[in-house]
Image (cartoon, helix red, strand yellow):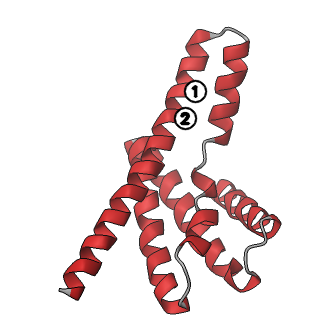
Amino acid sequence: MIKEIIFCVAGTLAFSVIMKAPKKDLPFIAIGATITATTEKVLTKYYGEFIACICAMLCLSVFCEMMARILKQPTTIILMPSTIPLLPGSAIYYAMLYATQSNTRLFLHYAKSTIYTGLGVALGAVLSTIIIQLLSYNRKH
């Protein structure tokens, strides 16, 4: 599991460099990717990929909101690259592979995994945004 997390962080950093993320933000992107990958890998064993992705996204959003306030920059600079470990790349690949091979059983397995992961990431992002907006609103009023 530790090797997977290290490769997730390395891949995230490579993606960030290719996409020209600010060099000063690369350490924070690496921390965000570590949070995301670790949370997802640990929780998937116990709760499944849907809940794991929601929790990973919530943890990442809290970290990114804190860093945005400390660094005085937009949250998305760290948030977007740090979600790379959550992307269901292999599941999408295998779903399409088995779809082209007409292997319905394996296609459905990987398609379900892709959908659960995507929904988990989306729901986690929405929930974290709502929570942060409510906290900001309550602090202002």
Give the number of the disc on residue 114.
2
The answer to whether residue 35 is left or right of residue 22 is left
Residue 97 picture quarter: top right
Mark 2: amino acid: Thr
At 64% across and 59% down in the image, what residue appears? 5
Q: Is residue 115 above or below residue 44?
A: above
Name the image quarter holding residue 65.
bottom left
Q: Position of residue 15 (x, y in %)?
A: 76, 61
Quadrant where the image shows the C terminus: bottom left
Q: In this image, 44 relative to 100: left or right?
A: left
Q: Residues within 10 Å of mark 2 (few under 14, many from 20)?
A: many
In three-dimensional space, the C-alpha distance between marks 1 and 2, rounded to whole angstroms, equals 6 Å
x, y percent for residue 85:
62, 55
The picture places residue 123, in percent across and down from the top left corner, at: 39, 50
**Residue at 52% from the left image edge and 75% from the top image edge:** 75
**In the figure, is residue 24 to the left or right of 67?**
right
Vertical comparison of 71 with 63: above or below: below
- The kind of secondary structure element at disc 2 is helix
Compared with 95, 42 (above or below) is below
- Label 1: how many residues lie within 10 Å, few (<14), some (14-19) or many (20+)? many
Q: Position of residue 83 (x, y in %)?
A: 58, 59
Per the rendering, the mark at residue 110 is: 1
Considering the numbered disc 1 on the image, is that residue within a helix, a strand or a loop?
Answer: helix
- Pick the front one: 64 or 136: 136
CB atoms at circles 1 and 2 under 8 Å apart? yes
Please tell me how many numbered marks the rendered image carries.
Answer: 2
| Residue 55 in view (yes/no) | no
